[in-house]
Image: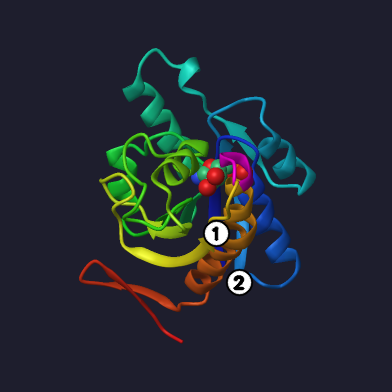
Amino acid sequence: MLRIVVLVSGGGTNLQAIIDSMAAGKITNTEIVGVISNNKTVKSLERAKNAGIPAVSVSPKDFENRDIFNDALLDAVNEFKPDLVVLAGFLVAIPPKMVAQYSNRIINIHPSLIPSFCGVGYYGLKVHERVLERGAKVTGATVHFVNEGMDEGPIISQKAVCVEDGDTPEVLQRRVMEQAEWILLPQAIDDIANGRISVVENKVVKKI
Ligand code: GRF
């Protein structure tokens, strides 16, 4: 049974997709042992509570500096003894110590087709604003392992989504969530939980 802890920052729609996929049997051999948010009052904590999942918030505002927060975040993750850490709309940089301790055991959902529209400053709605500004016709989402870089870890899966004429950033974000994020992240968790994913020379290999 794969023990996963899910880190969230906002609405928690990706967390909800995981919860719903487990209930529907699309994710097997997996247990969400905890949810951690860097915000106290967010819908994602409510989603965890409604699903009976232990949830805590660890907010940078509650610590005198970033190093102390980083240690508190890692302690909170370790408390749940996870096999896999899932970043589901988590908008805080992962401490290097945590990346080292959970090498190739942290995954992230990014709302673009990496290596496009990613890296510093590309998160949430900003990603979709840049996609529209550039006039891209196709965007999408990527699930990848987290390494010491920003959105640079081995890519697990990607799914393309069409950009439509007249799209606003909000409309495009919703389409990318519905057509890509909420499909890719549960699928990646199920693949990892059932031993179908390995990393060879920094590239993901998927066993069919
Ligand atoms: C989504 O755009 C996700 O791709 C990004 O954060 C946003 C909110 O995700 N990482 P959620 O609704 O909190 O899961």
Q: Sequence-wise, which precedes: disc 2 or disc 1?
A: 1
Q: Residues within 10 Å of mark 1 (few under 14, many from 20)?
A: some
Marks 2/1: CA distance?
Answer: 9 Å
**Image position, residue 197 (x, y; %):** 41, 74
> Magenta part of the protein: which range?
167-171
206 up-or-down from 145: above or below: below
- Write down which quadrant ligand 1 falls in: top right
What number is the disc on residue 33?
A: none
Q: Identify which amino acid the numbered label 2 is placed on.
A: Asn
Residue under the image location 41 percent in, 84 percent down: 207
Residue assigned mark 1: 3
Q: Is residue 88 visible?
A: no
Q: Is residue 145 visible?
A: yes
98 up-or-down from 23: above or below: above
Residue sticking out furthest to the top = 64
Residue under the image location 63 percent in, 70 percent down: 27
The image quadrant that residue 186 belongs to is: bottom right
Residue assigned mark 2: 29
**Image position, residue 135 (x, y; %):** 43, 49
